[in-house]
Image (spheres, rainbow, N blue to C red):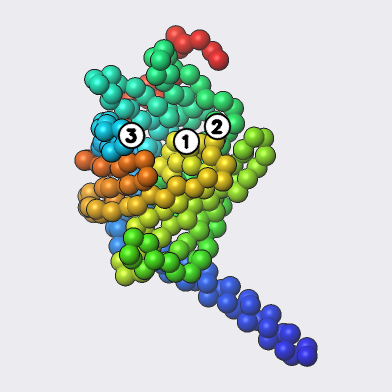
Amino acid sequence: MKIFYILLVLTVIGAGRIQAQTVDEIINAYFEKIGGKENWRSLQGIRIKGKMKSPMRNTEIEMTTVYLKDGRQYSITNMQGREIKQRVFDGETLWNTNFMSGKAEKTNSEATENFKRTAGKDFPDPFLDYKEKGYTAELMGKETVEGVECFKIKLIKTPRIIDGQEQQHFAVYYFDTENYVPIAMEMNGFGGGGMAGRGGRGGNRQMLSVLSDYQEVEGLYFPFSRTTGRGAMIIENITLNPKVDDADFKMPEDNDEK
């Protein structure tokens, strides 16, 4: 009986190791496909220009987003000729522009804290050196998405605060079993900013994003289309290591403190 128990324990431990290796093999194959880890590590910033299309509202909004390695970021939307800054983070302060007043407003303390917890970690890709970030990747088997057989991988990130309580923060990615690139992803607790939907709201809600149209930019590959139930983000141009001004991230000083 003791021998059986020992063998059972060893089998369970061995299975866990095999699964961990399998997850890393998939992730390593992914980075080989999209340009190599070293090239991704060398990135200091990314600027993305594109259009948000909403069939339900029959609208099209131009958007430019800048992400930096140090966690700073901003998005600019162009609505009927009016440029509005949203999800701006200067390293300490997270702020948005009020659509009605046109004034910059700080987000609440919970949203800011959640943003700080992951600022820069998802740049340029959440799977890059994920263990060093304190993230955990779990292979959950295979699943068919959009008619494609995929590896289902759960990436557990830094816990986030929801209504004063820490909750698990994770995303589920579906990697094409043939090409080793994600064709879809689900965010747990979506609603916020960042490359992967960071923010202070969302709870346990999930939203599926379908990723497609991978294109090369200076040797690296990016999905140029992201579609959700709300509409689609169609990328028109990606600039690597763009020149930025520190002032672009600073909250205007002539706003009333909230």
User: Which residue reaches farthest front?
Assistant: 56
Mark 3 falls on what kind of element? strand
Gap in Å between the C-alphas at discs 1 and 3?
14 Å
* Residue at position x 48%, y 30% in the image: 91
Q: Looking at the image, can residue 16 be seen? A: yes
User: Callout 2, which amino acid?
Assistant: Ala
Q: Residue 192 carries which label?
A: 1
Q: Mark 2 = which residue?
A: 111
The disc, 1 or 3, on the residue closer to the chain's N-terminal end is 3
Mark 2–mark 1 CB contact (< 8 Å): yes
Q: Please tell me how crowded label 1 is: few (under 14), some (14-19), or many (20+) other residues with Cα within 10 Å.
A: some
The disc, 2 or 1, on the residue closer to the chain's N-terminal end is 2
Please state which of residues 231 and 48 is positioned toward the viewer in this rendering.
231
User: Callout 1, which amino acid?
Assistant: Gly
Q: Please tell me how crowded label 3 is: few (under 14), some (14-19), or many (20+) other residues with Cα within 10 Å.
A: many
Q: Please tell me how crowded label 2 is: few (under 14), some (14-19), or many (20+) other residues with Cα within 10 Å.
A: many
